[in-house]
Image (cartoon, rainbow, N blue to C red):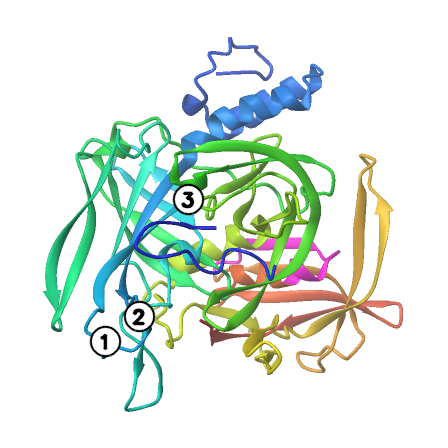
Amino acid sequence: MKKAIIAAAAIACAAVVTLCGCNKVKITNNYYTMSDAQFSEYMDELEESGASTESLIEIASQRSVLSSVSILSFVPYLYEPYGRDSYFSSSVLMDAVFSGSGVIVDLNNSSGDAYVLTNCHVVYDDSSNVYDSDYGCMTSAFSPVATKVYLYLYGQDVEGTNYTLVYSTDSYGGYTYYNYTCSDDGAYRIPATIVSVSVQYDIALLKVSGSTVLKNSNAIAATFADDDEVYAGESAYAVGNPLGYGTTVTTGVVSQDSYNTYLNVRSSVYTQYREIKTDAAVNGGNSGGGFYNSRGELIGIVNSKLEDSDIDNVAYALAGSYVKRLWPLMRDTSSGTVSTEDGMGLKRPYLKGAYTDDTEYSSLYGSYFQYGQDTGYDISYSFSYTDSQGRTRIKETVAANTTSYGLQVGDVITHLTITDTNGKTVEDLDITRKYMLDDALLSYRDGYTVTLTYTRNGNEKTANVECQWYSII
C-alpha cells in the first residue's frame, strides 16, 4: 500500500490478505474555520434538511483533505542486483523512497506543531538484509525505520511542481551510497520525526515541530467517530496519495465493520489486524490515509487491499475505535518505542496474567503467524439485530476465560469503566463486542482503576481488575 518511487519495491501491502443552533448564522463554507462541534452541527442541519449522502460526502471530503498529508519516507537499503550476498562487489547502498499518506490528528496552527498518523509500513522496511556467511543467515544491514520523513499538505504534494527528488553520493563501509532527498520545495516540505512505530498494529506516530508551512496553512486535525458508529452498508470515503500522485478522494461503502486480516509488515511474519472492509478504491500510496464516514468523521486508517486478477475493490482500514486510543498511548509512552527489526516496540496494557503470545510457525508457508493475544475473554455467542435507527448490528456475548480478578470462567462481561488517578472517568461503555474491551484497555495508564460489570448465574456483579504492561513489536 505504500508506493516505492525509487530504488526499491514496496512490501507487505496486499493481503495474502459559524453556524446553526438556536440562532442561525450564515454558512461561509470555510470549513477550516469551523470547530469540530460547529462542523458536526452543520452536518446535522444538512441531514435534517434532507441532503443526499452524495452531498454530505462532497462537503465532508472538502474538510477531510485539509487534515490529510502525502508522505515521502527514506529508508537505507542495500541494492544487490546479482543476489543478496554482501560479498558481491556490485552491491551499492541507496535510499528506498516510499510514498504514502497520513492524517493530522492533533494540531496547533500558531506554533506549527502537529501529530500525524500513518501506517508502520510507510516508514518501516526490514527487507534491507544481507547474507552473513559467518552466521549462515540473513542479517539486518540497517535500521528498518526511515531516516527522513517529509510531509506535504493537500495542493502542495505534486512531484515536479512542489518537490523534486534528487540524490547525492557518499561512501559508507566501502560502498557507494546514493542519498536521496528533495529539492526546490522549501515552501512546501514539512519535516517530521518518528515518535513511535508498531508492527503489530501497523501504525506509526509522527511529530512535526515549529513548521512554517503549517503556520501559514488552513490545515486542521481530523475528528474520530464514536466507537459504535460504523456499520455495514454505510457510505464512506478514503483520502490518500495513490501512486504518489497527490491527495485523492475515493468513495464506497463499509463492506464489513470488523474483520481480521493477516499481513506481513515484518518479513516472514504474518500478523493479525482487526480492520474495516470496504469497496472504496485504494492503491499503492493510499497507506496511512484516512477512511471517513459521510459526516467526515475518521473511522479508520487505510492499510491494505486484496490483489488478484479475480478480485475487485476489496480494501481494508485499521479500525478507528482502537487507533484513536492507540496514538495517545504511543505519544505518552514514546521513550524507546521505535521498533528495530528484532527489538521490542510499543508497550500496551492487558488484563494481568491473561497475555499469551499466540504465535504459530507454518512450515507450509515458511512464515510465522502472529494471532491476536489472549486478553482474558472470549466470544461465546453472537447474533444480529436491528438497532433503533433500523441498521443491522451484531451483538456478541463476551465471557471471561480466566479465573483471576474475582472473575470466573463463563462470567458474561457487560460493562467496562476506567477512571484515572483523580477519579475522572476515562472509559465508560457497555460491552457488546469483544473488541470493545481490547480497544478500551488502550486507555489505561499506571494508577488507573479498571472496573468490569458482569453477570454470573443471572446475578450482576462488579470487579476491579488489574492490568499489566507487555512489550510488543
Q: What is the CA distance from the residue labelled 1 to the residue labelled 2?
A: 8 Å
Residue at 74% x, 38% y is 233
Q: Where is the C terminus found, in terms of image quarters?
A: bottom left
User: Cβ–Cβ below 8 Å for labels 1 and 2?
Assistant: yes
User: Per the image, is 72 magenta?
Assistant: no
Q: Which of the 4 image quadrants contains residue 400?
A: bottom right
User: Cβ–Cβ below 8 Å for labels 1 and 3?
Assistant: no
Q: Which residue is mark 1?
A: 88
Q: What SS does tag 2 mark?
A: loop
Q: Amino acid at mark 3?
A: Gly
- Where does the image place residue 36, in percent across and percent down from the top left? 50, 30
Of badges 1 and 3, nearer the viewer stands 1
Q: Residues within 10 Å of mark 1 (few under 14, many from 20)?
A: few
Q: Residues within 10 Å of mark 2 (few under 14, many from 20)?
A: few
- Where does the image place residue 325, in percent across and percent down from the top left? 51, 54
Q: Which residues are magenta?
A: 422-437
Q: Which residue is mark 3?
A: 102
Q: What is the CA distance from the residue labelled 1 to the residue labelled 3?
A: 38 Å
23 displayed left or right of 127 = right
Residue at 68% x, 53% y is 258
Q: Which of the 4 image quadrants contains residue 355?
A: bottom right
How many labels, in total? 3
Q: What SS does tag 1 mark?
A: loop
Label 1 or label 2, whichever comes before in sequence order: 2
Q: Which residue is mark 2?
A: 82
User: Cβ–Cβ below 8 Å for labels 2 and 3?
Assistant: no
